[in-house]
Amino acid sequence: MKDPNARLLDNELAFKSLFEHATISILVTDENGDINLVNPNAEKLFGYAKEELTGKPIELLIPESLKDKHRQYRQQYFKEPKARPMGLGKDLFARDKNGRTFPVEISLGYYKLGTKKMAVAFITDVSERKKAEEILRSSEETTRLIMNSALDAIVCIDTNGCITVWNPQAEKIFGWTESEVKGRRLSETIIPEQYRALHEAGLKRYLTTRQHTVINKLIEITALNSNGKEFPIELTIIPMRQKDNDFFCAFIRDITERREAEYRQNEFAENLKQKNIELEQFAYVASHDLQEPLRTVSGFVELLKRHYKDQADENVTKYINYITDASDRMRRLVQDLLEYSRLGRERILESIDCNAMVQDVLSDLTMAIQESQAVIHIGRLPVISGYTTEMKQLFQNLISNSLKFRKPGDPPVIDLSVSPKDDHWTFKITDNGIGIDEKYWDRIFIIFQRLHTKNEYDGTGIGLAHCKKITELHNGKIWVDSTPGKGSTFYFTVRKRSSDVWK
Ligand code: ADP
């Protein structure tokens, strides 16, 4: 059998080695709080050599502001010493040689050395852990803040389809509080009957195969609120993973108002379309029927002229001429109106080579071009899909206006070009004519609106109204930019189709 003293010696050696190599810092103090033993890890932690600490009060390692409190604790402890485990919920702090204060966790042991009461402190620096906890806490706080202030309802479910997250906005749009729905199945709360099976199957499929059709996309669907009312929503579902657990978050918006606005807009557009059709019909019928009495007026005026050819006095002749002029003019107006209401009536989309079409228009306008000595540049134009008669009229009106509204004495210089955009062509026709004051830029496109008397420039004021209607028939628009006295640029667009090409 081994000598008991030798065994004691063995134990002592073992403890010594433990003390020396422990990765925890160990300090032993006596009842007076004087440090008796310091292990190498404690030397490292506090930055003092063993000799600098031995015999010194333990308060050397306590931050200034806590020293008094610590002294009281210590005296209290030695009155009734017992082992105390780590992390008793107290926030403890230590101080190293450089004055750095850091959070520690301390467990205390106790033994007697003869009559002396000794305390052993096992100290762990927990600064890193506290920092990590702080980061976690602040990220949790941030998450909570985002959840609470998000404009979207945020609803998360676990892999069983049960609700785990339900933010205040979700309470607002669905009417259930968080505590009422947490843990309940999504399919038994906000998902309408008709989508339930689909939702369950989709969830199962994603979890087994990772295949999905609705994830990470903006989808529009309906949902139920706590009163069982179905309403339209827009949502994006994002799959997430935390500590090996799958879950899904949906960001949801109530789009009832938007839908209602869309509905009202559609209704309005439909109404407008109907009104336009009625108006066109009215214009057609009115202008058509007006022609008849007009013909009668013209007929009788002709008769009067012939009848009083020799006997009419100066005044009668003058009046008859007035009537003739006025009824001619009225006939033109009525014909224009008729033509306007007929525009695009029997529409067939055709492929139009704008180059050839514009050459046709120019040859129709040869007289006016020669008379005015106009210089006309035509750029490269595309082949588009459009309504042939109407498109020709559009080019014809714009070019003839540029010839007509020239500055007296200045030969017109006209430039026609096109630039392609994503979904439309923008045509541009520039002249060096009299120009248009900005306050009339909209008015000139209204039917029968003119800026001049018929004596200054001939016309009825329907040309640009035609142009506007024609561009609208081609899903485009028309507008003008101009400097009075310098010239005007008319722009118009027509929708581009896949078959359109440059020629
Ligand atoms: P009209 O040519 O019969 O007068 P439009 O509808 O074609 O009718 O044009 C309306 C008005 O717009 C014209 O009376 C004229 O004042 C103005 N306008 C049109 N084109 C031009 C142009 N190129 N330069 C200056 N003014 C123009």
Image (cartoon, grey):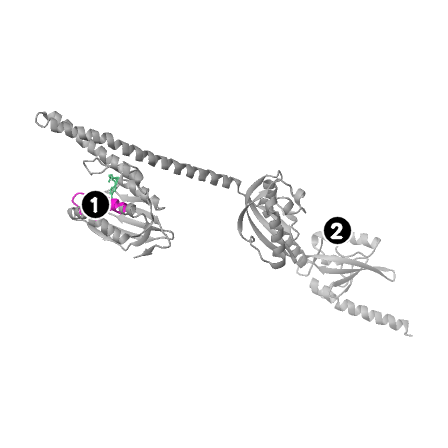
In the rendered image, residue 406 lying in the magenta stretch gets the answer: yes
Q: Which residue occupies the extreme right position in the image?
A: 1
The amino acid at mark 1 is Leu
| Front residue of 228 and 78 | 228
Answer with the quarter of the image where residue 151 lies: top right
Q: Residues within 10 Å of mark 2 (few under 14, many from 20)?
A: few
Q: Is residue 57 left or right of residue 349?
A: right
The residue singled out by tag 1 in the image is 403
Using the rendered image of the protein, determine whether residue 251 is visible from the camera's viewpoint.
Answer: yes
Image spot of residue 345 (x, y percent)? 33, 42
The residue singled out by tag 2 in the image is 69
Tell me the residue at 65%/49% (across/down). 164
Q: Which residues are magenta?
A: 393-413
Q: Earlier in the sequence, mark 1 or mark 2?
A: 2
Image spot of residue 383 (x, y percent)? 31, 54
Q: Which residue occupies the extreme left position in the image?
A: 310
The amino acid at mark 2 is Lys
- Give the mark toward the camera: 1 or 2: 1
Within the displayed image, which quadrant is ligand 1 positioned in?
A: top left
